[in-house]
Image (cartoon, rainbow, N blue to C red):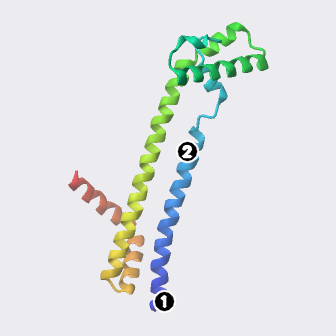
Amino acid sequence: TPGATEATVEKYVANKRAQQETINEYLDCIEDILSPGTPLQVAFSASGEGFADEDEDPDPKRQRRHSVGSQLLETLSLELGLSTEQVGELSGQKDSIQSDRELKGKISNLIQELRRHVGQHISSSQSITDGLRRILTPHQVAKFLVWVERNQRSMDMLNTMFSEDVE
């Protein structure tokens, strides 16, 4: 029946949208896991060797970041009762923390790029489905979509073959 056929097509489209939302939720979780929220990182990466002098760097932004980091480190050392030696050793973690922060930045950029590509794929898939709906009858579209779902392995193999030809 035409109503059931249209419902099948709409269900397919809704499933594709739900898949995109699921992908975005997973990417959100990854970003949350990787998010730099540790004050310790700020304190130790922004401070030089413990409580450094703010007048060393002429760049106001870097100076402010350095000052905030020094203040955090000072507060932390008081709260934890750190010795001067411990503060110095913790400050020695600066390079590792900076490297980790840069890596997280690269990962964040890749996640944003992945989000864009997934969005483009969903949009392209929707355009193809819309095109099929203009060319085929509603019943044929529904049968096609059901066939694609049932033959997903064959479709994946076919897509792999096409992508190898393009490269």
Which residue is label 1 attached to? 3
Query: Which image quadrant for residue 69?
Result: top right
Dot 1 or dot 2: first in sequence order is 1
Q: How many labels, in total?
A: 2
User: x%, y% of residue 109?
Assistant: 45, 41
Tell me the element at label 1: helix
Q: Could you say which is closer to the camera, residue 46 or residue 152?
A: 46
Callout 1 crowding tier (Cα within 10 Å): few <14, some 14–19, many ≥20: few
When the figure is inspected, residue 84 is found, relative to residue 132, above or below; the finding is: above
When the figure is inspected, residue 133 is found, relative to residue 74, above or below; the finding is: below
Residue 145 tag number: none
Amino acid type, label 2: Ile
When the figure is inspected, residue 131 is found, relative to residue 88, above or below; the finding is: below
Residue 30 tag number: 2
Give the Cα distance between marks 1 and 2: 40 Å
| Camera sees residue 151 | no
Q: Could you say which is closer to the camera, residue 77 or residue 66?
A: 66
| Camera sees residue 44 | yes
Q: Residue at x 68, y 7 (%)?
A: 85
Query: Which image quadrant for residue 128?
Result: bottom left
Amino acid type, label 1: Gly
